[in-house]
Amino acid sequence: MRADITLESGPYRVKILEGQFFAAGQIFFNDVMICNNNGYNGSVFAPAGGKFIGAGHQEGGVEKLIAAELTADGRKINPLSGAIRGEKLLFEKFSQLDRLKIVYRIELTPGQVNFSAQWEASADQPVSTFYVHQYCWSEKTTGWTARMRDGSRTAGEFKSDEGWHLNGPYWTSWFSMYDPETQTGFVVALDDTTSSSGNCRFWDRKIYHKLYYQPVLKPVIRAGEKSPFYRLMLRGFKAPPDAWQNEAAEIASALQKP
């Protein structure tokens, strides 16, 4: 028997949605929703323009779920349903998007949440668009800041106007968003492989402030080619409005320590 799953560790709670092929839904930090499911989260792929596959997208086909596994503090959990709490939770999903086999991992500890994804081509695969990681961050966030691989910093304000932020050839090292109403923020740091392999951008909508992480790929991935794991590391924090950007920078530095 399968159903939605809720993963809990320390202040973090992640809901996994069976109806979206076990993609992540809502994400909470200290009971504040920092990611919603007003769109689709996880990995989404398009072999041709607009033909998206993954989670709820079916314009180009349907994601094929191969297996889903959960380990809590070293113990396999079966059946996959209900709320599971632990010091270390590892959820792994094995699926296929067109000709790409996907391994997607969500790991929770009391200190952070990690998202990792890897692809492998079972046959030659044309590529139009591949969002290895996309997440619908809360529409209640009002500001963002980010650091690039060259050490520069940039920041902006969300207007929920359908605009784009970080929409260029930028190599993002980390970014942070902040909700002043709850004085809650979060940092998402990219490991070195991930930050050097692609870029981030945000879609500024009324229903979410959505992250798209897109690796740079060839027009055709050849059969047998396999990617590294693309890894995002998330940590939440509380801070007053005049201090959140400094707090974010300190947390990012800690997350990216070797």
Image (cartoon, rainbow, N blue to C red):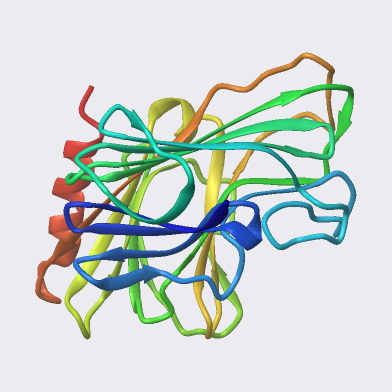
The residue positioned 67% from the left and 56% from the top of the image is 55
38 in relation to 9, above or below: below
233 in relation to 32, above or below: above
Image coordinates for residue 15, horizontal then vertical, percent:
43, 60
The residue positioned 90% from the left and 48% from the top of the image is 48
Image coordinates for residue 112, horizontal then vertical, percent:
25, 45
193 in relation to 29, above or below: above
From the viewer's side, name the closer residue of 86 and 63.
86
Q: Is the C terminus in the top left, top right, bottom left or bottom right quadrant?
A: top left
From the viewer's side, name the closer residue of 24 and 228.
24
Relative placement, left or right, of 31 versus 115 is: left
Q: Which quadrant holds residue 182?
A: bottom left
Image coordinates for residue 6, horizontal then vertical, percent:
38, 58
Residue 136: in sight, yes or no?
A: yes
Relative placement, left or right, of 32 versus 225 is: left
The residue positioned 86% from the left and 61% from the top of the image is 59
Relative placement, left or right, of 180 versus 36 is: left
The residue positioned 84% from the left and 39% from the top of the image is 98
